[in-house]
Image (cartoon, rainbow, N blue to C red):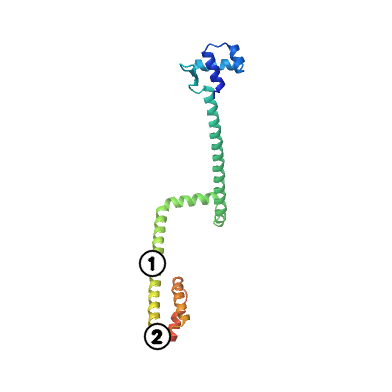
C-alpha cells in the first residue's frame, strides 16, 4: 500500500518541486520518486485541486500480491481439507474391512466380492427391506402398547385389591401395616418392569378379600 511518504512525494511532484529537493526533504531515493510519478501517470495516486494527494486505486502489483496471499491461504485450506477427507475415507474403508472380513471368510468369499454383493442385494431389495423394517417398527409399537395396557390393567387390579383390603382392615378396628403401604407403592413401580409383586400376596394372606 502507498505510504504517507509516497503521497507527500506526489504532492511535491505536482507542485513542480525538483527531484533533488524531494530527496533532501523526504529522504527518499530517485527510484522511489520515479515509482510515485509512474503511479500518478497510471492514476493510482491522484492530487486534488488543493494539492492534496490521495490513493485513487490500488496498484496492480498490490492486487497481485493480495491475490497471491489469498490463493496461498485457499490452497493451504484446500490441501488440509483434502488430506482430512483422505484420512476419513481410509478410516471408513479400514472399518468396513475389519467388520466384514471375518464374515466374508466364513462364507468363503473375497471381501471385495462380499461387499459388492451386499450392496447389489440392498439396491435390488431396498424397497422390500424398508417395508419389512417399517412393519417391524409397527409390530414393536403394537407390542409396546399391549404391554402398557396390560400394565395399566394390572395396576388397577392391584389398586382395587389394596382399597378393599384397607376397608376390610379398618372395619376390623385395625390399622393397615406400614409394610403393606410401602410394598403397595413399590409394586406400582415393579409392575412396569414385570417383576413379582409383594403387596398382592400380603393382601390375599392377611385380608382374604
Residue drawn where x is 39% and y is 72% of the image = 152
- Number of marks in picture: 2
Q: Residue 50: horizontal and vertical position, in percent?
A: 47, 17
* Residue at the outermost bottom position: 172
Looking at the picture, does residue 129 appear above or below residue 162? Answer: above
Q: Residue 77: horizontal and vertical position, in percent?
A: 54, 37
Which residue is more in the foreground, 16 or 116? 16
Q: Is residue 30 left or right of residue 197?
A: right
Q: Secondary structure at mark 2?
A: helix
In the rendered image, the quadrant that contains the C terminus is bottom left
Q: Quadrant of residue 176?
A: bottom left
Q: Residue 166: horizontal and vertical position, in percent?
A: 40, 82
Comparing labels 2 and 1, the label whose residue is closer to the camera: 2
Which residue is more in the foreground, 82 or 160? 160
Which residue is more in the foreground, 199 or 18? 18
* Residue 145 marker: 1
**Looking at the image, is mark 2 or mark 1 earlier in the sequence?**
1
- Residue placed under numbered mark 2 in the picture: 170
Looking at the picture, does residue 151 appear above or below residue 1? Answer: below
Amino acid at each position: 500500500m502507498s505510504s504517507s511518504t509516497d503521497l507527500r512525494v506526489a504532492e511535491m511532484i505536482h507542485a513542480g518541486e525538483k527531484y533533488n529537493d524531494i530527496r533532501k526533504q523526504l529522504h527518499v531515493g530517485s527510484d522511489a520518486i520515479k515509482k510515485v510519478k509512474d503511479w500518478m501517470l497510471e492514476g493510482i495516486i491522484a492530487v486534488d485541486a488543493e494539492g492534496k494527494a490521495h490513493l485513487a486505486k490500488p496498484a496492480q502489483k498490490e492486487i497481485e500480491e493480495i491475490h497471491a496471499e489469498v490463493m496461498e491461504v485457499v490452497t493451504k485450506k484446500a490441501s488440509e481439507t483434502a488430506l482430512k477427507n483422505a484420512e476419513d475415507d481410509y478410516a471408513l474403508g479400514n472399518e468396513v474391512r475389519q467388520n466384514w472380513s471375518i464374515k466374508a471368510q466364513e462364507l468363503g468369499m473375497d471381501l471385495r466380492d462380499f461387499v459388492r454383493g451386499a450392496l447389489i442385494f440392498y439396491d435390488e431389495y431396498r424397497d422390500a427391506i424398508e417395508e419389512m423394517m417399517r412393519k417391524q417398527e409397527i409390530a414393536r409399537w403394537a407390542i409396546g402398547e399391549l404391554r402398557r395396557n396390560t400394565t395399566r390393567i394390572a395396576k388397577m387390579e392391584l389398586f382395587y385389591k389394596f382399597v378393599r383390603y384397607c376397608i376390610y382392615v379398618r372395619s376390623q378396628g385395625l390399622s393397615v401395616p406400614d409394610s403393606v403401604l410401602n410394598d403397595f407403592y413399590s409394586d406400582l413401580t415393579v409392575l412396569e418392569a414385570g417383576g413379582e409383586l409383594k403387596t398382592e400376596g400380603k393382601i390375599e394372606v392377611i385380608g382374604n378379600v
